[in-house]
Amino acid sequence: MATKVVIIGGGFGGISVAKQLSSSEFEVTLIDKTNHHLFQPLLYQVATAALSPGDIAIPIRAIFSKRKNLNVILGEVTDIQKDAQQVQLKDGELIPFDYLILAPGSQYNYFGNDDWKSHAPGLKSLGDALQIRERILLSLEKAERLKDASKRAPYLTYVIIGGGPTGVETAGSIAEIAKRNMMRDFKNIKKDETRIVLVEAAQNVLNGYPDELSDVAKNDLEKMGVQVLLNTPVKDITDEGVQLEDQFIETPNVIWAAGTAASPLLQCLGEDLDKAGRVKVQADLSISDNPNIFVIGDAAYFEDKDNNPLPGVAPVALQQGKYVGELINDEQKGKARSNFKYLDKGMMATIGRAKAIANIRGIKVSGFIAWLMWGFIHIFFLIGFRNRFRVFAEWIWHYLTFKRGVRLITERKKED
């Protein structure tokens, strides 16, 4: 009888596990709330009209179309019954398992201010990206119709909250839109009317990067016209704008990129969680009271050799997924478990056209070379030849022409 393996989440970690379990001795079930695998690192480019949704997403069924031992379920897991070794879906269906891998990803953390979410959407899904894209485009359309520059100002103001990679990349991308790319298509808007503000509560953008690279990123953003506010916590967010300690910024264009929290589903495990809700896993990524339940990716709290928690980034999820898949394969062959070890290959972030930073095992790179490295690595991790080719072609087009092609408004919101 085949060993039943249930994977919750079709992100980098879940897909990585599933790819390792191709043997017919496993009956694999992959469950996700959406029908597609999403390349989240490029989600901001959908939000800023650089790429189409189909460029960074692929149906999960298409990835595993040739796998006879794998079943994909479009559904939401609402409960995990450890003793009975089964998970329950929202519709009540129960799915048994011998091994369970939780890779549900994360969600944005509004630090107890959940009402801010409607005013400042985050970037975790294609729906989020499209909502932000349409807000930006609608604001430009509204500004174009207003003759009074003071009345145009709020619609030409963009506030990004959070100075991590997503916040920095989004701010740089919006700056390129506002200062160069789209202004040629609007007759009444001047590029110097736009205002892009990046708000960060800490003393640096890109915390976790070396200070010199953080400074490079900040300087590049400022040269692109982004106002960077450090040591500036947000007090409130409303329909009218953002309240900071010493000023109120009037705008309907607010994007949240300040922090993440793990999936609430993890609470069903009854395990010790960190402040972000991640499960504190064992050395083999399993939970404390069941060696056949694993937690990986954004959902796992795991410390490296220097006792620092691993970040919630794609390389971590990919390596953990591959490790768990190989562990299950080996265990079926009677081999003993080994501990998970993360190989840090470095980290990088892009700021704008020909502007990026990278820290590759202590080697610090910035500028055009780092931007090329960032581009090639991201294209390499995209799933499917079609996606890689399309993204590469779009980037070359943008670089040569400064034009962004995906500027469609598909769902008009009701006028105020």
Image: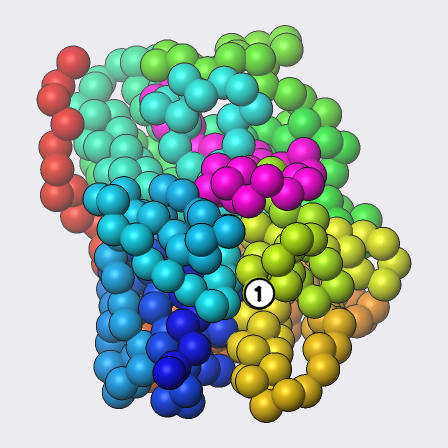
Residue 245 visible: yes
Which amino acid, by three-letter code, is at mark 1?
Answer: Asn
- Percent position (x, y) of residue 18? 43, 75
Give the residue at x 71% y 77%: 337
- Give the quarter of the figure containing the C terminus: top left
Q: Which residues are magenta?
A: 251-276
Quick check: is 272 in the magenta stretch? yes
Q: Nearer the viewer, residue 186 or 107?
A: 107
Q: Which residue is mark 1?
A: 292
2 sits to left or right of 374 = left
Q: Secondary structure at mark 1?
A: strand
Kindly indicate the quadrant of the structure image that contains residue 218: top right
Relative to 63, say whether 53 is above or below: above
162 sits to left or right of 360 = left
- Percent position (x, y) of residue 248? 51, 11
Quick check: is 259 in the magenta stretch? yes
Q: Nearer the viewer, residue 298 or 42?
A: 298
Q: Nearer the viewer, residue 260 or 247?
A: 260
Residue 392 visible: no
- Percent position (x, y) of residue 285? 66, 62
Give the residue at x 45% y 57%: 85
Relative to 318, say whether 41 is above or below: above
Q: Nearer the viewer, residue 31 or 174?
A: 31
